[in-house]
Image (cartoon, rainbow, N blue to C red):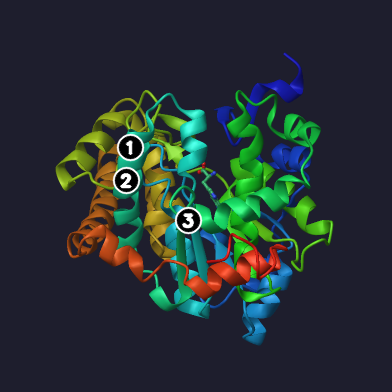
Amino acid sequence: MPEEDDFTVTPYAVEGDIDYDRLLDRFGADALTEGQIAAFPDPVHPLVERSVFYAERDVEPFLDAVSEGSTHSIVTGRGPSGPLHIGHVVPLYFAKHLQDQTGALVYIPFSDDEKSFLKDVSIETISDRSRENLLDLLAIGFDPDRTRIVVDTADADVIYPLAVAFAREITQSTVDATYGDPENVGLSFYPAVQATHLLLPQLVRGRHPTLVPIGIDQDPHVRVCRDVAAKQRYDVDKPGALLSKFLPSLGGPGKMSSSDEAPSILLSDDRETVFEKIRTHAYSGGQSSVEAHRKQGGDPAVDVSYQLLYYFFEGNNERMEQLASEYRNGSLLSGELKDIAAEKIADFLDEHQQRRQQLGPLEDELQQYRLTQLERETARNRAGYPDNSLTQQ
Ligand code: TRP
């Protein structure tokens, strides 16, 4: 098999044993440097410090704006294709953390259109899933004054005219070269929609640095959007990106995915289910018997329970080092490590679920996060629609 072909990473497929460094060459993004990591607001989030977010495009203008205290925004979104699992919320919780630290504006688009082009599920099902996913999003507790949530089909009055403007800048051959031949015209058009998402903060608030923290599979959308911005037809800068590795699947290295053989851990799982899934399915870096493990020790680098703690659920570095060394020297058994991970994840989910239960009806809660009429008009104007356009009401 040719070297390039042993893994696939696109917005629509992630397969094989991913070589994250080679992927950067393929995509033309840069590894995050020590200096950039240190420039994140203090304390640097473990996801950045531990290189889960490991690569970037134009992260520096964003970090400069953070340190100067000037306007800066974050865009991170969700394709509502099914129930949320713990891998999906990593960028969302990260955005919440940065917003708390720096007062960042956060824009969260829901691409329900994209998922209906992609999956063989009805529009009704996607719509139900959007509602469920939105409740989970609201449970994260973003600041309503600084956060906007848009749903492509529900906020079509603003998304569609902007996407139309940007679609003119994206050729079919760019789409084919970036994504492979799209299956339907919806997927051909969708890059213009995601470009709209990534430029929306600047269209609403004027030109300013935007950062898109996102799984690296989404980088093609960022590239297409940056090309649109680079044409300078609109008063926007290219959005920057912070690209992450994937939370491992319980079954072993590889992205956690709803279509895996091993189950993913859902945001709705109760404690018992979390323990059961981890005890039964989490790939272990330990030895096959207790005696062998006590003698030879385990390998945290391939142990999924350890990796889940490292990636997201245990922020304390000393604790991580202690677990790694006890695992390597055999004093910590696989089963014990699994229970430590399960406990942490179950605590996280408990808190999330409690916040979700306290929410009122979705429409009421969502209201405070929707774009205002003025924001909608401003965005359409900046995309070139005149005041007398029929899109303005
Ligand atoms: N396409 C993303 C996905 O499938 C969801 C998404 C839509 C998104 N717009 C976005 C993610 C903007 C980040 C930024 O998961």
- Residue plotted at (36% across, 46% down): 130
Q: Sequence order check: which comes first, mark 3 or mark 1? A: 3
**Residue 54 makes an appearance in the image:** no
Q: Nearer the viewer, residue 74 or 91?
A: 74
Q: Secondary structure at mark 3?
A: loop
**Identity of the residue drawn at 31% across and 54% down:** 136
List the residue tagged with mark 1: 294
Compare residues 130 and 239 and report the one nearer the observer. Answer: 130
Q: Nearer the viewer, mark 3 or mark 1?
A: 3
> Judging from the image, what secondary structure is the residue with disc 2 in?
loop
Instruction: Determine which residue is flagged by label 3.
Output: 155
Residue lying at 37% horizontally and 55% vertically, measured from the top left: 313
Q: Decide: marks 1, 2 in contact (CB < 8 A)?
A: yes
Q: Which mark is residue 374?
A: none
Left or right? Give the position of 83 relative to 244.
left
Position of the N terminus, as image quadrant, is: top right
Q: Whole-percent x and y of residue 103?
A: 50, 79
Q: Distance between the Cα atoms at labels 3 and 2? A: 55 Å
Q: Is residue 181 left or right of residue 77?
A: right
Check disc 2 and report the residue beneath it: 331
